[in-house]
Amino acid sequence: MKNWWVVLLALLCFTAIANEAENYKLGPGDVIVIQVFGEDELKLETQLTDSGTVNYPFLGTIKVVGMSIKELEQHVYNGLKPDYFVEPNVFVGIVQYRPFYIHGEVKKPGGYPYQPGMTVNQAIALAGGLTERASKEKIEISREGDKNNTQTGTLNTKISAGDTITIEQRFF
């Protein structure tokens, strides 16, 4: 086993992405699926709106924005268990993450699909690369589109779904 370190590195990367996905908070624009094993009529696939709620059979309206996948699974499990099922097997998954946005000195500014573990550099690649006037040092990231929650980033900064990335011009 000559390349044991390659296997270890791959395992560490997979674990980091799995942890990021586990801690991911649902928000408007995410497409989720809720399923109960063996109960096809309880399957719900929906895109979260600004209201942040879903209407689920037996449970009514559930506010899901700000919850993690595990928290939503537990909420549905707890709601179905006492009155409707002995031991419901609940699964909640993300079908599609809400997009991130990139503008400024990139060739194709706009909204793009987010993937867990994505960096600013990967976001720039999706946007067609940097323009000739782009600065690699002047990168601002607004978390969840909140202008008051802006941080300076680098090409290796991890982004989140819903972030807005601004690439500034460099001065010659």
Image (cartoon, helix red, strand yellow):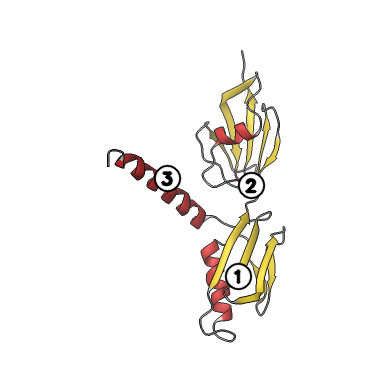
Residue 54, horizontal then vertical, whole percent: 69, 67
Residue type, label 1: Gln
Residue depicted at 65% across the width and 50% down the height: 98
Task: Find disc 3 in the rendering and name its residue.
Answer: 13
Q: Earlier in the sequence, mark 1 or mark 2?
A: 1
Query: Which quadrant of the view contains residue 101?
Result: top right
Label 1: which secondary element: strand
Residue 139, horizontal then vertical, whole percent: 58, 30
Q: Going by the image, does 66 lie left or right of 5?
A: right
Q: Nearer the viewer, mark 1 or mark 2?
A: 1
Task: Find disc 2 in the rendering and name its residue.
Answer: 162
List the single residue furthest toward the left.
1
Residue type, label 3: Cys
Tell me the distance, in whole angstroms, between the alpha carbons under discs 3 and 2. Answer: 22 Å
Tell me the distance, in whole angstroms, between the alpha carbons under discs 3 and 1. Answer: 28 Å
Q: Are marks 3 and 2 in contact (CB under 8 Å)?
A: no
Residue depicted at 51% across the width and 54% down the height: 21
Residue 31, horizontal then vertical, whole percent: 66, 57
Query: Which quadrant of the view contains residue 159?
Result: top right
